[in-house]
Amino acid sequence: MTYWLFEDVSYVTIFGILLIGILGIVYVQTFQRIYAWGMAGVVLTLCLLVFVEQWVITDKEAIETTIYEMQAALEANDFQGLLNHIDPEAEPIRRQAQLALSSITIERVALRDIVIAIDRSSEVPTAEAEFVATIRMQPRAPFPNQGFVRLRFLLLFHNEAEQDWKMLDYFYGEPTGQPTKHYDGTFNL
């Protein structure tokens, strides 16, 4: 399917602008109204495509939104808000989140290099989201990383019954390495 069209409309926009430019040059040289109507048609088509792109939420955009909502919940130290994005059946992950958040107060979470891969081959679509997170925090107990930590995370999601994407599991590791560890009470690497 043409998910790329709804993920990033910039390719079509660039093509449309080039087409408008060519039609404009031809119109100026010939003064035939058909080229002016062609430019108007391209502008209307571009406006329609931008509207549709904003209206259609792809799975990738939904997962990205979920990640940013989790980031906002972490920055607000909103444990329940974070749990809303973790699958209720992923009880070990929910306990690990509670353990981690009970020992720190998060001040800021910065995300970068988000890469999302979706697998629709099974009955229940799954996805992996990998990114680097820099977390600035204040410890509530002795914490080895003194105020901030930068880690590469791999979050595993699923989408049962075409509802919201929920996190099933996660792994973390060095920012330049592969995420391979679970939280065990500290973020020691």
Image: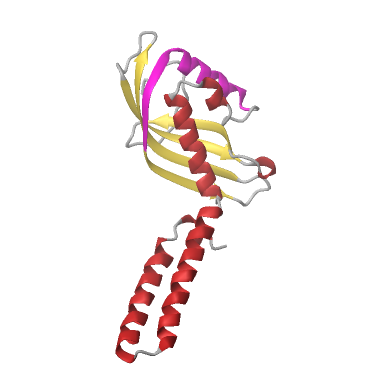
50 drawn magenta: no
Q: How is the image coloured?
A: secondary structure
Quarter of the image with the N terminus in it? bottom right
Task: Report the residue at 65% width, 48% height from top.
Answer: 122
Up the image or down, 9 lies above or below 150; here it is: below
Q: Is residue 126 visible to the viewer in this orientation of the structure? A: yes
Left or right: 135, with 171 as reference point: left
**96 above or below 63?**
above
The reply to whether residue 171 is in sight is: no
Of residue 1 and residue 120, the one placed in the foreground of this image is 1
Q: Is residue 181 left or right of residue 25?
A: right
Q: Can you say which quadrant of the picture contains the C terminus?
A: top left
Q: Position of residue 107 (x, y in %)?
A: 36, 22
Residue visible at 31% across and 85% down? Answer: 28
Magenta-highlighted residues: 90-111
Left/right placement of residue 24 relative to residue 102 reads left
Q: Position of residue 90 (x, y in %)?
A: 61, 27
Q: Quadrant of residue 89?
A: top right
Residue at left offset 32%, top offset 37%: 176
Viewer-nearest residue: 33 or 66:
33
